[in-house]
Amino acid sequence: MEQTTRLLQIMAQLRDPNGGCEWDLRQDFASIAPYTIEEAYEVADAIERGDDDDLLDELGDLLLQVAFHAQMAQEKGLFDFEQVAAGIADKLVRRHPHVFAGVTFNSDEERHQAWEQIKQQERAGKPAKAADNSALAGVTVGLPGLMRAEKLQRRAADVGFDWPQADPVFDKIAEELTEVREAVAAGDLAHIAEEIGDLQFAVVNLARHLKVEPEPAMQAANRKFERRFRAVEKTLSDRGVAVEDASLELMDEIWDQVKAVEKASAADQ
């Protein structure tokens, strides 16, 4: 706790109008929010890379974001860091009755249902801002698109709006792909964007039914593409060919070779 106190003191000094940092003093919740999101992704990246030293550093950067927001809130008389910590501690106890209140769940499904019921009770107990009794209430708008789609679908599924198995979702994806083709044929860019969004939403639905988290799956696909494309670039460089001068046919040929090597390596492990 000594270092936590030190961090909060440093943050307060940075925001002190008398001798603080000009940049820090100019910030508000909105201007800092993008950095908070970025730091969360950098934590996830360090975990994915298995870099424990970097994880330590990135967790510190993320904690700084919490301290920064709490300091600005304290200056406005809204809340302080201790209230943030107390709030999440109370929430953890409240949402884990099987750990802190002697409740027994016979399955993960029972635990999940209880978790959702507790969250609904929490939402109902908050001061009314505008009446919103929707099952979708509280799904954060600022989440990455794939992640928000999965959460919206899961909420709808909790009240019975869902296919019982994955098979119909394959048909839905085929239907949405046909509609993309029709929109492309019509040449309406806004309609194309809408139909591509519907297609992505359907793919997220399939991932959910197959117990795959869509956002990490997308990130893994990004990393795979980057790894393979860099291998293509290296192969071209080894051959003395600049990537911008290589034909698509040559790049495709090398790409297939890279894929084959990867698959062979994976099969040997």
Image (cartoon, grey):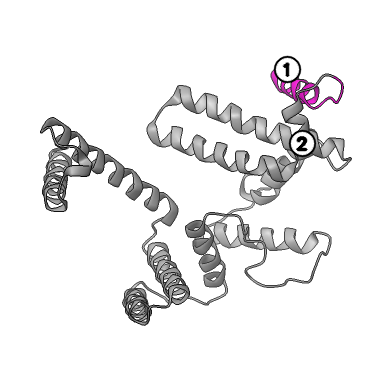
- Quarter of the image that includes the N terminus: top right
> Which residue sits at x=36%, y=74%?
169
Q: What residue type is labelled 2?
A: Ala
The residue located at (73%, 30%) in the rendering is: 24
Image side of residue 153 versus residue 188, left or right: right
For the residue carrying disc 2, how many other residues have a C-alpha within 10 Å: few (<14), some (14-19), or many (20+)? many
Examine the rendered structure and indicate whether residue 225 appears above or below residue 173. above
Q: Is residue 125 found left or right of 245 in the rendered image?
A: right
Q: Is the magenta stretch mostly helix, strand or loop?
A: helix
The spot of residue 236 in percent (x, y) is 15, 37
Magenta region, residue range: 1-18
- Residue 3 point in image, percent of width and height: 70, 18
Q: In this view, does 36 lie to the left or right of 167?
A: right
Q: Which residue is drawn at 44% across and 53% down?
A: 215
Residue under circle 1? Answer: 2
Residue 146 seen by the camera: yes
Describe the element under mark 1 as helix, strand or loop: helix
- On screen, residue 59 above or below 117: above
> Which label sits on residue 70?
2
Q: How far across and how far down the image is residue 16, in percent?
A: 83, 24
Dot in front, 2 or 1: 2
Q: Is residue 86 above or below residue 208?
A: above
- Direction front: furthest residue: 245
Q: Does the magenta stretch include residue 162?
A: no
Residue 4 falls within the magenta-colored stretch: yes
Three-letter code, disc 1:
Glu
